Amino acid sequence: MAYQSIGLGTTEGDGTGDTLRIGGDKVNDNFVEIYTLLGTGSALTSGISATASVVTLAGPSITGVASFADGSVSAPSITNTGDTNTGIYFGAADTVNVTTGGTKRVDIDSSGLDVTGNVTATGTVEPAGDTAAGDNAAIGYTSAEGLILTGQGSTSDITLKNDADATVFTVPTGTDDILFPDSARILMGASSDLEIKHTGSHSYLMDSGTGDLYVAGSTVYISNAATDEIGLKFVQDGAVDLYHNNVVKLATSAAGGTLTGVWVQTANIADDAVTQAKMANDSVGSAEMKTLSTLLIKNSGGTTLATFHTAGA
């Protein structure tokens, strides 16, 4: 029903207005419509109350568009009674903002969601797209690459820290390197079956607990972990040095090799492995033979293969 206005006439008492009965009927019809929309027809039940400045609706159901003022970060347009600096406001076109205590916490606009402060999730956070170059800090996912971490910093793009806020490793800015701090170790296996570490003077590649394999410059060393005693050294040009008590006993080079100290043959020499014709002049001299006058080389059957006479023979 449309609103019914009471006819008042042109001038007072001119007889052109509605009669009292007709006017009263219009008033009744208007109130019946209001009471029906906001109550039972005879009583209001909508929860509407009003003061001089506030109209309150208890549990309203809005089927159309509710329009609000923009509001601000300190006075949001959708707020809570008694806490007027907390709520929702509209800081710019196509933007919805959330404020608590007068401080902006959430921006939602065409670029996505921007949160100020920590984000705590009770479930998982699952990204659905790739990251991009220039992202300050982003988590992404693709079906081929899986989880993707992308960062951008002045010294490092990615820094992983432990619960003591100490750096575990970094990815230096603009590189594909992984940089570990000094004295860091990579342990593989429950009992550190393979240990990769750096201790300052040497760059260790493997530590088994009783011995090390490490690289220093262009040289590979095998040493004793307890004493750092070198046992074997491989040089970049192909030379190999065999050590005892950190003293070179066998040194090879492109020209041949050098033996240091006394060498003892404890096993039999194979038949014809050494003959007098194959021995270089003076390879065995009187100084080496000392008081011996004759050197016999025999095979495993006891047959003499070669006889050498010293200077004292």
Image (tube, grey):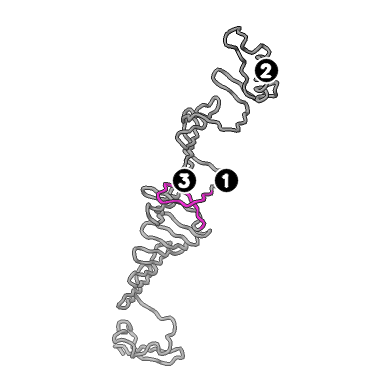
Q: Are marks 3 and 2 in contact (CB under 8 Å)?
A: no
Q: Earlier in the sequence, mark 1 or mark 3?
A: 1
Camera-near label (1 vs 3) is 1
For image coordinates 36% across by 49% down, the residue present is 155
- Figure check: 270 above or below 95: below
Residue for point 65% across, 22% down? 34
Per the model, the C-alpha gap separating discs 2 and 1 is 59 Å
Q: Which mark is residue 123?
A: 1
- Residue at the top extreme? 13
Circle 2 sits in a helix, a strand or a loop, which is it?
A: helix
Earlier along the polypeptide chain: callout 3 or callout 2?
2
- Residue 28's tag is 2
The quarter in which the N terminus is drawn is top right
Residue highlighted by disc 3: 164
Query: The C terminus is located in which quarter?
Result: bottom left
22 left or right of 168 in image: right
- Residue range in magenta is 126-143
Q: Does 139 appear in magenta?
A: yes
Q: Residue at x 46, y 43 (%)?
A: 111
